[in-house]
Image (cartoon, grey):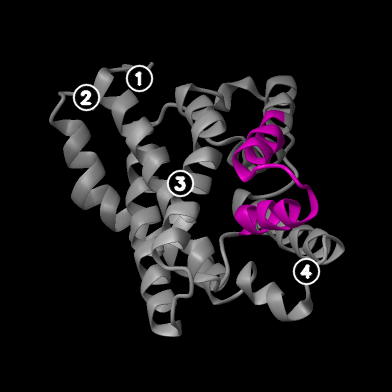
Amino acid sequence: MKHVSKRRVMMSLCGVVICAIAVGFFKLAAFGVDPFQSLMSGLDQLIPIPFGTLYMIVNAVLLCFSLVFNRHNIGIATFINLFLLGYITQFTLETLQGWFPDPSVGLRVLFLAVGIVVICIGSALYMTADLGVSTYDSVAITISGKWKWGPFKYVRIATDLVCVLTGTAVFLLGGGTWGQVPEIVGVGTIITAFFMGPLIEFFNARVARPLLARSGNP
C-alpha cells in the first residue's frame, strides 16, 4: 500500500490546480481542448450555469458511476479534481479575458503552447502522486480493467470519441455554429491526443519523480 505522505497530497493538489490553469489557457486560445473538456465546453454552451458548478455536477455524476462499479480508482486526488478544477479554470479564463479581451492569432498560439506545457507538468505531478484518478479517467479504466471490454488504449479512444462527438452536438444545440466548433475541437485537441503522453513522461522523469523521491517515498 502506497504511503499517503503530505508530499503526495501537495503534489496532487498542485497538479490539479496547474491543470485547471492550463485549461483556462486552452479555452482562451480557442484552438481546441482535450476530449473531455470539449464535452464540457459543449455543455457549457447549452446549460446556463457557471462553468465551475457545471464541471462539479458532471463529475459528481461520473463519481457515482465509479462508486457503483469500481471504487478502487477513487482517492484524494479525485475529490480535489471534482471540487477545484472547474472553478479554477473559470477564474483563470475570466482573468485572462480581462487582461487580453481580443488576443491576436499569435498570442492565441502562444497561449496554446503554454497550455500544453503547463497541463503536462500538472498531469505529471498528479499522476506520480498516485492518490486516485479523475472521474473521467475512471470510466475507461473500469470498462477496460473490470468489465474486460477491450484494451485500455482502445477503450480510451472510444470514450474520447464519444466526448468529442457529444460535445460538438450539444455545442451546436446550445446555439454554437459550425464555424465555432474548431474552438473546442481543433488543432489543440489533436496535439493533446498525440503529444501529451510523451511530454507527461518527460516531466515525470525530470520533475515529478525526483520531487517525490526527495520525501523518501518509493
Residue 20's disc is 3
Q: Are marks 1 and 2 in contact (CB under 8 Å)?
A: yes
Is the residue marked by circle 4 packed among few (<14), some (14-19), or many (20+) residues within 10 Å? some
Q: Are marks 2 and 4 in contact (CB under 8 Å)?
A: no
Q: Earlier in the sequence, mark 3 or mark 1?
A: 1
Is the residue marked by circle 3 packed among few (<14), some (14-19), or many (20+) residues within 10 Å? many
Q: Amino acid at mark 1?
A: Lys
Residue in the image at 18% along x and 37% along y: 211
Percent position (x, y) of residue 163? Answer: 72, 56
Q: Amino acid at mark 3?
A: Ala
Q: Quadrant of residue 17?
A: top left
Percent position (x, y) of residue 218? Answer: 23, 27
Magenta stretch in the rendered image: 35-60
Percent position (x, y) of residue 44? Answer: 71, 52
Q: Amino acid at mark 2?
A: Asn
- The answer for how far apart the CA atoms under marks 3 and 1 are is 26 Å
Q: Earlier in the sequence, mark 1 or mark 2?
A: 1
Point out the frontmost of discs 3 and 1.
Answer: 3
